[in-house]
Amino acid sequence: MNLTAAQKEALHHLRASYVGPEAGDEEVTANLPHRQYAVGMLFPVEAEARGSHGGGNTGEEVSADVPDGDVEESGAGVPLAEDWKPSSVALSFVTDGDSVDVDFSCGTYVAVEGDGPRRWRRTPFSVDGLDLRRGKGPERLSVGGVSVEIGSRWRDFQGDSLVTVHIRVLSESTGDDRLDIPRTLFQVHLAAAPCAGAEILEYDTAGSIDTDPEAAELRLRYRNRKVYAVGHGMAADWEFAEDRCAKVFLDPVPAFVVPAVETTGFDEGTAEVEALELGHLQQIDKDPEAVLRSLDAFLEAFAGWSSHQMERAEAFSDDRAVAVRIAGRSQDAVDRMREGIDLLRAPGRQDLRTAFSLGMAAMRLQMRQASINRGKPEEHVPEPRWRPFQLGFLLVSLASTVDEGHKDRDLVDLIWFPTGGGKTEAYLGLAAIEVFRRRLAHGTAGGGTAVITRYTLRLLTSQQFQRAAALVCAMERLRATDDRAKGMAPFSIGLWVGNEVTPGTRVEAREALKRLQKAARPEEANEFQVESCPWCLMPLTPRLRSDKPEDYGMRLEGADVVLHCVDPSCDFAGELPLAVVDEVLYKEPPTILLATVDKFARLQFKPEAGRLLGLGTAFRPRP
């Protein structure tokens, strides 16, 4: 694993913070060690656990955490305490030798005697080159007064030996966490190396049972990723020397460098590249032939790649069926993309072409504004382009999104791409098309909530809200300036999260505004959750308390608290199309609703929340 200097520093900091010792081998810490560190610890065995093991009999076993069908199933159970406070860890691997050399190290902490605040001193311990071999019983060690067992189990496997080396704390718990600190092992490290002339072999899982189609596909996809050890209670890793696995070891904080994903590029000046340009795509209602010609070229490029993948899949031998199934999904995507393009080409779908054009115009406007907010002069902002996977997602999902009776309506299209790759923009582009289409097709009845984005509990990122809100701002700009969108119902975005986070009623919102204007540090008292204008990024609250109401991006209008940009030159200085108060959301359902899953769980207890689904409104409910 090759790390940059910055990555090495970050990983070192993480391991020092979570495993320790943060201040050196003989550190003295004022914090309780079991509270300061989170992983890499072995605790004294609970009394009932000891009883179940027959007073330390290592014959008692708990099943290891290895999938059914793995080689580990051949009698490789180890005495693991798989609970909140594990007292043992283990490492399994395959070797062609009859012994292994084991290195073990850890630290123990004892209270420092004397006056003053309680402190804990670390004492390091290590033993290297411990010889463990077939038929040899476990070794017992005293580590800072803690009784520890290190042993191994050997099983025959395809002419070699499947070995599980374990460490187990034998000392019994006092039942008091603080009193157990001197009996706990910290920063546990376990490594094993083959004896002279022997090797650690691949931990071969080729004989695994494919429990379901996904397991078979994962096995095929990762067939070239070799595994040399499996950890129990901790992750396993290995080191190579001279193209051979020289050592396997446990790692409480495993790390892996995820390689960058490079998107497929097209030659400049080709029709495929033109299809990626939003400025070109938004001309589809005025010059459909030119846009559709470029989309056809884009589709054919993907279809050619898909056909090549199927040829490769057909060449597989034993796993041909699995490979063909994987490649077949890309061909399904080709068919769905073609169906989307055919819809855009259909003579009677001018409404869809207009919606597609407005969606592309809104995304183009939002992307250009994002570049301007990053400091790029407006005249130097490059023409926004989709990445190929983003345009592909739009075309794949288009038909099943706009056709309520489509056969793929219940199919969930997952965008699988690394963070920062453009997933949010891809689904926002599709959302924009559908929002405009509903209004064009159904008029006023096409208003209301068209898109619901659900997040897990409070894990709603401000960046994603920022981009979605910026799109809504762009759509509002089009509603004010584009004849095709003029007269449409206003666009808005709502934040529907727990009332511990945002006000639930207008009364609560007014009280929240009063507290905000009285707070010494308004940014810390902002219960409206919106920190800056989504269009120009101007902060909506002053850094310190101000007596000027215009310094705050929230003002009282009648019974409502209205959000607005504090920059008079911003297009949204009058009002931002944002709503965060539950009562307002129910009365005026927003176009795009960003919600947390716990809110949906309470739908049955909030009849008025049904308005978000179009129930009891003039808007057309979604099926």
Image (tube, rainbow, N blue to C red):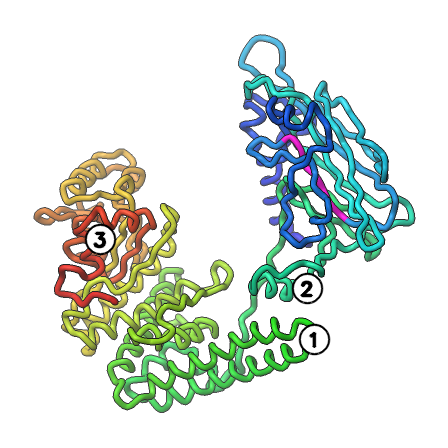
**Residue 220 lies in quadrant:** bottom right
Q: Main secondary structure of the magenta part?
A: strand
The mark tally for this picture is: 3
Q: Amino acid at mark 2?
A: Arg
- Spatial CA span between label 3 and label 2: 50 Å
Q: Which residues are magenta?
A: 87-93
Secondary structure type for disc 3: strand
Mark 1 vs mark 3: which is more N-terminal? Answer: 1
Residue 246 in view in this figure: no
Mark 2 vs mark 1: which is more N-terminal? Answer: 2
Is residue 50 placed above or below 480 in the rendered structure? Answer: above
Q: Report the residue at 65% width, 59% height from top.
A: 209
Q: Amino acid at mark 1?
A: Ser
| Depth check, front residue: 117 or 582 | 582
Mark 1 neighbour class, 10 Å CA radius: few under 14, some 14 to 19, many 20 or more: few
| Residue 525 marker | none
- Spatial CA span between label 1 and label 3: 58 Å
Mark 3 vs mark 2: which is more N-terminal? Answer: 2
Q: Position of residue 109 (x, y in %)?
A: 65, 22
Residue 291 in view in this figure: yes
Which residue has dot 3 on it?
579
Which residue has dot 2 on it?
223
| Depth check, front residue: 64 or 280 | 64
Q: Amino acid at mark 3?
A: Ala
Horizontal side, residue 490 vs residue 246: left or right:
left
Q: Position of residue 97 (x, y in %)?
A: 87, 47
- Residue found farthest to the left: 558
Q: Position of residue 514 (x, y in %)?
A: 17, 37
Is residue 443 placed above or below 9 in the rendered structure? Answer: below
| Residue 317 marker | 1
